[in-house]
Amino acid sequence: MPYKDICFATVEVVRKAAAYIRDRHLNRRNLNIKAKGRQNFVTKVDTEAEQILVKGLSKVLPEAGFITEEGTNKKKGETYHWIIDPVDGTTNFIHGVFPFAISVGLLKQDEVVAGVIYEFGLDEYFYTWKGGGAWLNCDPIRVSAVPRVKDALIATGFPYTDFSYMEQFMESLDHFMRHSNGLRRLGSAATDIAYVACGRYDAFYEYGLNPWDIAAGILMVEEAGGRVSDFRGNADALHRGQIICSNGLIFDEFLDTVRKIMVHR
């Protein structure tokens, strides 16, 4: 099946999971909140939405395995794996605060070839497939054209389990507060990256992430004309736990600053 067809079929599966999550967002009884770790939560909605996604995606590409945040399916595929975050921004969801999102990426070997991010607050479907560009609700999207970091709006995420970079991270906040157009923190990495892809943000960086947080977004930014790496400049950021992404014009400057501050010296 062509990646474009896989992508549109994935959107339809995401719609089903989104309908369930939206209903539970409006009817907030019995969320059954559990702590997976400090400031790291899971609800009944996460696990049931993940099961809806797994069931639907198993029909789209039966041979594919799964890498899922909540571990509801651990099937191994030979070539393809779905990477699923049923609710990216669970803490926001628990408190009834937007944004929170569904993020689904399709991995072929070590390369993301399709991705869908659905953000609930603005009812926005971001989707992409390899060689097909990046899209938002049927319209093509591109990264911004801001040429300098000092004019950029930068997004980040606060660490909640891994505090080993805290000194460097606080230094980075101080730097970008003084040398950019502003900093934002929404609480959903998938949404942040989608906003880079459509030009609302000019750059994003965060550490302590998992593949399901960023898989769909990596391809989306690249197909929208942007660039992605880890803090050291390695392009294969999916499994490295850290990511920067931006438009192509400021990428080298942004990477140089993040690398100087955030990489352990």
Image: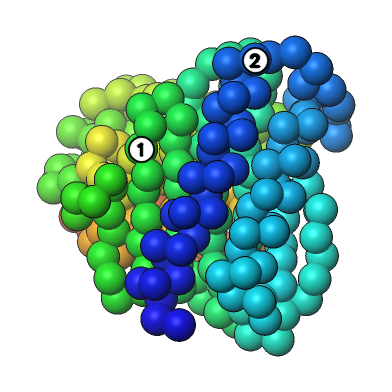
Amino acid carrying label 2: it is Asn
Q: Which residue is mark 1?
A: 124
Give the percent coordinates (x, y) of residue 172. 47, 33
Front residue (pair 64, 15): 15
Front residue (pair 115, 255): 115
Left or right, 67 with respect to 33, comes to left
Q: In the rendered image, is residue 232 in sight?
A: no
Amino acid carrying label 1: it is Glu
Q: In the rendered image, is residue 181 in sight?
A: yes
Left or right, 92 with respect to 143, comes to right
Q: Which mark is residue 44?
A: none
Q: CA distance from mark 2 to mark 1?
A: 21 Å
Q: Is residue 51 above or below residue 185?
A: below
Classed neighbour count for the residue bearing mark 1: other residues with Cα under 10 Å, few (<14), some (14–19), many (≥20): some
Residue at (64%, 44%) from the top-left corner? 86
Give the percent coordinates (x, y) of residue 157. 53, 33
Query: Which color scheme did the rendering employ for the protein?
Result: rainbow
Q: Quadrant of the N terminus?
A: bottom left
Left or right, 131 with respect to 65, comes to left
Residue at (61%, 63%) from the top-left corner? 57
Residue at (75%, 40%) from the top-left corner? 48
Q: Which residue is mark 2?
A: 27
Residue at (18%, 33%) from the top-left corner? 151
Q: Secondary structure at mark 1?
A: strand
Give the percent coordinates (x, y) of residue 160. 70, 30
Front residue (pair 1, 111): 1
Give the percent coordinates (x, y) of residue 64. 66, 76
- Sequence-wise, the earlier of marks 2 and 1 is 2
Write down the quadrant of residue 73 in the picture.
bottom right
Q: Is residue 137 above or below residue 75?
A: above
Q: Is residue 155 above or below residue 207?
A: above
Q: Secondary structure at mark 2?
A: loop
